[in-house]
Each structure stands twice: as C-alpha cells, then as structure tokens.
Amino acid sequence: ELKVEQNPLFLSMQEGKNYTIYCNYSTTSDRLYWYRQDPGKSLESLFVLLSNGAVKQEGRLMASLDTKARLSTLHITAAVHDLSATYFCAVGRLVFGKGTKLTVNP
Amino acid sequence: SAVISQKPSRDICQRGTSLTIQCQVDSQVTMMFWYRQQPGQSLTLIATANQGSEATYESGFVIDKFPISRPNLTFSTLTVSNMSPEDSSIYLCSASSKNTIYFGEGSWLTVV
C-alpha cells in the first residue's frame, strides 16, 4: 500500500526566509504532484514531476524529485505572505500526503 | 488545462436523504476521479469513474453508498446516499489531462 508522508505538517515562517517541505513515499512511482489549497478553495496544481532528477520552478517555489530516495522537496525562497496556504504532495494514483499548512508572517 | 465545474457548490442536507453531485469537464478526458476531503484533513480517493463501465472503488467505499455514473468522456456524477452527519465533507471531482490532474471547485456538503 502506497503511503505518503509530508513534513512538517505546520510551518510558520517569516517573510524573506527560505524553507523546504519534504514529501516521502513508500513505493515506486513514476510521478509526483504538488498542489496548493487556500482556505475554502479547491486545489491548484503547482508542479508535476515525471522523472528522477526532475526540477521545476515557478516564482518562489521550486520542486524536485529523487525517485531512488522516494523523496520530493518543495523549496520556498524568500517567502512572502501570499504563499500562506496548505501544500499537498500526491503520488501515483493521487495518494495524498496530509498537507503542510504554511503561514508566512510579516 | 482542463476546466472542471461542479454542482452544487454547497448544500445543507437532511439526515437520511441522498444528494447527487455533477461534474462537467470542458474537454474529453480519459480518467475522472472522485475525492472526499473532511474538514481540516487531506484528500481521500473514493473511486475512479470509468466511462462505459462500473466505477472502481477504493477500500472503505462502496457502490451502495456512493453510486457513480460516467455516461461520457466529459461528465460524471457522484451520489451520496442515505446521508449522516459523518458524510459532511467536501467532495471533489478531478480529471486527468496531459500528465496533470485537475480539480473542480468542490461541493461542500453539510448534513444536519
């Protein structure tokens, strides 16, 4: 059974700082997704990572995938308040992690 | 990208009743899925909606409780049957298009 673990589950950070969210999964998969969810909203697709070593960047967010380690990271650079949201990783047939609730403080 | 519309967006339902949620995609897609997100929780896959055949349910979900239809490549429905307060949740439709899986806005159900 595929299991997906995210950490941390809660992250409070200051504007301008950098941080990384981790996503580990238990069995081999050929793709990994990152989503953003704002309170009261649905999920917004951020990245789809399809191969080992894949790296994608959009604005202050960068995602990478290491299929051998079964690990993906979502790196936040110079955080701003607008990045406050819950971030989910999902693997395979969309087994979701528990989500990381990010709060960026002024 | 695929644009997914769900109806209703919100509803308050009486215990014991059933509600059908509709999901419309703006393009033909092979795969459609239904998820549940309970308050403050992550998403759980209910079933894969198969066009022309019965849906494939995940462990813990059964057809009698969550009947699903998929009459064509752009439309699906999920019915939540004989609702109880434990069914209060967000129900999300999703579809696979060009290596990405997109989500509808969700249907927020409260059972009283």
Image (cartoon, coloured by chain):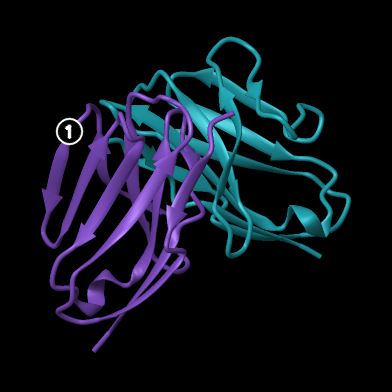
Residue appearing at x 26%, y 26% in the figure: B98
Say above or below: B75 vs B4.
Answer: above
Nearer the observer, A85 or B49: A85
Say above or below: B2 vs B29.
Answer: below
Please tell me how crowded label 1 is: few (under 14), some (14-19), or many (20+) other residues with Cα within 10 Å: few
Nearer the observer, B78 or B47: B47
Under circle 1, the secondary element is: loop
Kindly indicate the quadrant of the structure image that contains residue A38: bottom left
x and y percentages locating residue A58 in the rendered image:
13, 53
Residue on which disc 1 sits: A53
Chain letter tied to purple: A
Residue appearing at x 26%, y 53% in the figure: A74
Say above or below: A47 vs A7.
Answer: above
Residue appearing at x 46%, y 35% in the figure: A94
Residue appearing at x 36%, y 35% in the figure: A70
Q: From the viewer's perspective, is B32 left or right of B89? A: left
Quarter the N terminus of chain B occupies:
top left
x and y percentages locating residue A67 in the rendered image:
30, 30
- Which residue, as the protein is rendered here, is positioned at the far right? B16
Q: From the viewer's perspective, is A66 left or right of A70? A: left
Question: Which amino acid type corresponds to the residue marked 1 in the rendered image?
Answer: Gly
Q: Chain of mark 1?
A: A
Q: From the viewer's perspective, is B87 left or right of A98? A: right
Nearer the observer, A7 or B24: A7
x and y percentages locating residue B29 in the rendered image:
37, 22
Chain letter tied to cyan: B
